[in-house]
Amino acid sequence: MKIKKKLTKKQEKFVDLMVYQDYNQTKCAHLAGYENPGVAATRLLSDEAFFHVQEKIKQLKAVQRKKNEITFEGIAKKLADIRDVALADGSYGPAVTAEIARAKLAGLMVDKKELKIHKIDHMNREQLEARLQELVQENQIILGKAEEVKEEVRPSQGLQDLKADDSQMEDVEPDDSLDAEDQTQRAEG
């Protein structure tokens, strides 16, 4: 059975710094006033003679963890409270967002994302051609040679051609199944 020792002032300061500050053990020992902080910190944290210091650090850290504890139930309750307050205010957007967050927390909703990064950048010409061929076959795409049609049309010439085309239009017999507007479009077309 270990005898419970009291902490000295330096040990108390060391313990407080270790628990409440974001310093390494040597810095804590230095700030607590130890002359050789590296050796002092190692002994305080591992030597059985300083078991009382180690226990005090464990106790205080447990209290800190409990104080800042994040649990499923706690988060779900807070999100439900946020949802309820938002609904009471008529703020449906935040209410929906809180409810979605609760569903994600419970694992009922999962965001799935597929990342394809620069796959084509890493292909050589042969690989690209092979992949294109696969896509053509998978999607049953029919590739044919496109004919290029090059006509040079000057803006003023285009208007003259349109006027000439208007004069060459045939008369179209009226169709009883079409209304007047459709017949006009048919005659013009």
Image (cartoon, grey):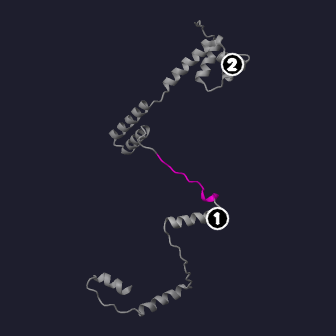
Q: Which residues are magenta?
A: 111-122
Q: Position of residue 75 (x, y in %)?
A: 43, 33
Residue 113 is inside the magenta segment = yes
Q: Amino acid at mark 2?
A: Thr
Q: Which residue is mark 2?
A: 42
114 is higher (above) or lower (below) than 65:
below
Residue placed furthest toward the right:
36
Q: Which residue is mark 1?
A: 126
For marks 2 and 1, the one nearer the N-term is 2
Residue placed furthest toward the left:
176
Question: Looking at the figure, which quarter contains the N terminus?
Answer: top right
Mark 2 vs mark 1, CA separation in Å = 62 Å
The secondary structure that most of the magenta stretch takes on is loop
Question: Looking at the figure, which quarter contains the C terminus?
Answer: bottom left
Q: Which mark is residue 12?
A: none
**Residue at the image position 61 percent from the left and 17 percent from the top:** 15
Q: Residues within 10 Å of mark 2 (few under 14, many from 20)?
A: few
Side of 2 where 185 appears, left or right: left
